[in-house]
């Protein structure tokens, strides 16, 4: 992967070098900006025995790595700023592997208050404008921004968006590529989508208050033909209500969401407890897994220092987790919490000390505790 990245970087530099003479002859029709973020996590991870490989003793270990939300970014703009684009590559190093991933690659055209965008990106639904500042541990069990621990984010996928907005309100509609294609109930079936994943999100601002309520929906269908398997169909949907209020140095952030069958479609959720199940083992009936979650966090700025803390909660419920199907309970809950004190030394360099805690809840099948986890660490943040 690193070899491919180096070749790509050399190709970009060569293209820029070739275009220099042209810039000297005639005005450029566009401008571009480069940016980068280099992050390094160092800390201690403590896992209870349920989360370890040996399943019999607690395990603690130091970690030092570059989490995958480090990036190299390029933005492009036409002279009139009505057309633009963004390419962003994620950088990750967790020895012995390093890799480069595609985070963003899109273009847009703006006319007045309207914008059409196409490419790889996220959107207003589950907007990161409301994210909590939980930063340490992405390479350790995917801990970032309490994703899947109270905060719903549908991740970046190829999509086409239409947005209308002004200073106080707006609306956005997006058609997106579905992420979930696997049939959980058998193999030898063909995935089909009558309609791509879609989201509709509104935006309202009033003084120091802002919200982006939204709805997302996709229908998953699987055609079995004459294989003897069932023709399966189920819906993944979610409603999200985020809110943010800022007054002076204090900011309050909140997001609540509810929905069904998040598994894989909305990542960072445990697949086993957020996918649909058979209501009867021998029938073709499917029972949806209902999901409810919320996160709340506060931030207080004192000069270059910020004090912030938050807590998130998720509940997963399915009526198919019944005693006759071999389950001990029909619900499981998980809780995450953090406290952090980021300090910005300069505009381009800061540190983020953080303590976080995660309780994985009880296993609906056995009723046993699925484990607890602590992370104590510091993230070094260089942003240009």
Image (cartoon, rainbow, N blue to C red):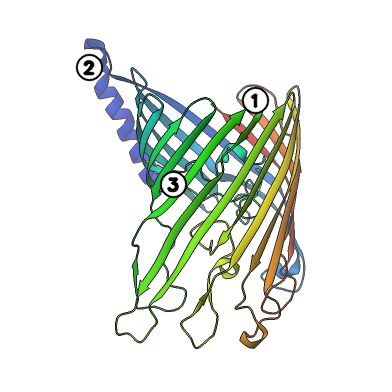
Front in this rendered view, residue 180 or 354: 180
| Badge nearest the viewer, 2 or 1 | 1
Residue 101: assigned label: 3
Q: CA distance from mark 3 to mark 2?
A: 32 Å
Q: CA distance from mark 1 to mark 3?
A: 38 Å
Q: Which one is closest to the eye, mark 1 or mark 3?
A: 1
How many C-alpha atoms fall within 10 Å of the one at disc 1: few (<14), some, or many (≥20)? Answer: few
What residue lies at 77% left-to-right and 66% top-to-bottom? 58
Closer to the camera in the image, 151 or 93:
151
**Cα distance in 3D space between marks 2 and 1:** 47 Å
Question: Quarter-wise, where is residue 269 in the image?
Answer: bottom right
Q: Is residue 95 visible?
A: no
Kindly identify which residue carries mark 1: 207
Q: Earlier in the sequence, mark 1 or mark 3?
A: 3
Residue 378 occupies quadrant: top right
Whether residue 378 sits left or right of residue 235 in the image: it is: right
Query: What's the mark number on residue 139?
Result: none
From the top left corner, tell me how far across and down residue 359 is, in percent.
74, 60
């Amino acid at each position: 992967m690193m070899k491919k990245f180096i070749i790509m970087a050399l190709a970009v530099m060569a293209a820029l070098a070739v275009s220099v003479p042209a810039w000297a002859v005639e005005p450029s029709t566009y401008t571009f900006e480069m940016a980068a973020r280099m992050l390094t996590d160092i800390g201690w991870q403590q896992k209870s025995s349920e989360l370890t490989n040996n399943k019999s003793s607690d395990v603690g270990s130091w970690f030092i790595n570059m989490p995958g939300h480090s990036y190299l970014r390029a933005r492009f703009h036409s002279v009139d700023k009505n057309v633009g684009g963004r390419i962003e590559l994620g950088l990750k190093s967790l020895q012995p592997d390093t890799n480069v991933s595609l985070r963003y690659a899109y273009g847009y055209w703006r006319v007045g208050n309207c914008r059409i965008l196409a490419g790889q990106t996220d959107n207003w639904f589950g907007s990161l404008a409301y994210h909590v500042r939980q930063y340490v541990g992405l390479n350790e069990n995917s801990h970032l921004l309490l994703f899947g621990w109270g905060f719903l984010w549908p991740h970046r996928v190829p999509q086409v968006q239409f947005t209308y907005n002004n200073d106080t309100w707006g609306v956005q509609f997006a058609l997106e590529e579905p992420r979930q294609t696997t049939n959980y109930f058998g193999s030898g079936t063909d995935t089909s989508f009558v309609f791509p994943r879609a989201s509709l999100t509104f935006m309202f601002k009033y003084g120091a208050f802002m919200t982006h309520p939204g709805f997302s929906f996709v229908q998953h269908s699987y055609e079995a033909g004459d294989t003897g398997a069932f023709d399966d169909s189920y819906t993944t949907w979610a409603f999200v209500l985020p809110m943010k209020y800022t007054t002076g140095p204090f900011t309050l952030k909140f997001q609540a969401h509810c929905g069904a069958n998040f598994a894989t479609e909305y990542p960072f959720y445990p697949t086993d407890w957020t996918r649909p199940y058979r209501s009867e083992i021998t029938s073709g009936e499917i029972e949806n897994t209902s999901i409810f979650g919320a996160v709340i966090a506060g931030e207080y700025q004192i000069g270059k220092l910020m004090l912030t803390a938050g807590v998130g909660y998720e509940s997963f419920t399915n009526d198919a987790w019944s005693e006759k199907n071999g389950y001990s309970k029909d619900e499981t809950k998980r809780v995450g919490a953090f406290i952090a004190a980021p300090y910005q030394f300069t505009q381009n360099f800061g540190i983020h000390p953080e303590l976080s805690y995660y309780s994985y809840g009880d296993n609906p099948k056995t009723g046993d505790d699925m484990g607890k986890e602590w992370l104590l660490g510091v993230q070094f943040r260089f942003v240009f």
